Image (spheres, rainbow, N blue to C red):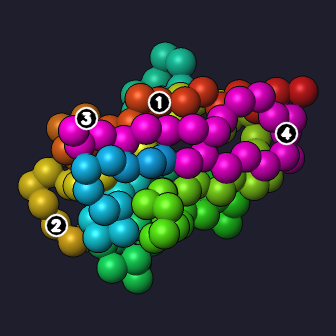
């Protein structure tokens, strides 16, 4: 069964850090474009960061540039989102996604659910003092 399973997240104070993980089963994450998305209460889902199939290209939404880093661990077949200098406005449910639809080696920050074939279950990140 092809699926993504997320871990990480939780409650952190402003200025703190968290790392989200996304594990793939049934396919190799390192070979496909993948990304991270988030949805805050009352808002639409938005793209946060993504990485191309080669890993040579990464993209970040303006609000997280310089603070978040997307990466992959080949040996563990994991996708990561390292989040530093967290702000209250980063509070949201975060989702990983993989394999763009239609397929491209370049990832996209388009956040419509049909834009990627596979989505994680979502994990809550709350930034609050």
Image coordinates for residue 54, horizontal then vertical, percent: 33, 79
Give the magenta range.
1-21
Residue at x-position 49% and y-position 38%: 6
**Which residue is denoted by mark 3 in the rendering?**
113
* Corner quadrant of residue 124: top right
Between the C-alphas of marks 3 and 2, the distance is: 16 Å
First along the sequence among labels 1 and 2: 2
Q: Is residue 56 one of those drawn in magenta?
A: no
- Is the Cβ of the residue at disc 4 closer than 8 Å to that at disc 3? no
Q: Residue furthest top?
A: 42
Q: Residue furthest bottom?
A: 56
Instruction: Decide: few, some or many residues near mark 1? Use Cα within 10 Å; few <14, some 14-19, many ≥20.
Output: many
**Which residue is denoted by mark 4 in the rendering?**
14
**SS at mark 2?**
loop
* Corner quadrant of residue 44: top left
**Which residue is denoted by mark 1 in the rendering?**
122
**Which residue is denoted by mark 2 in the rendering?**
104
Image coordinates for residue 97, horizontal then vertical, percent: 35, 46
Between the C-alphas of marks 4 and 3, the distance is: 29 Å
**SS at mark 1?**
loop
Between the C-alphas of marks 4 and 1, the distance is: 21 Å
Instruction: Decide: few, some or many residues near mark 2? Use Cα within 10 Å; few <14, some 14-19, many ≥20.
Output: few
């Amino acid at each position: 069964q092809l699926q993504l399973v997320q871990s990480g997240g939780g409650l952190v104070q402003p200025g703190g850090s968290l790392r989200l993980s996304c594990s793939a089963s049934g396919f190799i994450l390192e070979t496909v474009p993948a990304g991270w998305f988030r949805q805050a209460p009352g808002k639409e889902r938005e793209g946060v960061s993504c990485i191309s199939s080669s890993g040579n290209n990464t993209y970040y939404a303006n609000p997280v540039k310089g603070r978040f880093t997307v990466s992959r661990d080949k040996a563990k077949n994991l996708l990561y989102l390292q989040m530093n200098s967290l702000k209250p406005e980063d509070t949201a449910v975060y989702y990983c996604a993989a394999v763009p639809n239609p397929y491209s080696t370049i990832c996209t920050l388009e956040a419509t659910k049909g834009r990627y074939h596979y989505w994680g279950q979502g994990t809550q990140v709350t930034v609050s003092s």
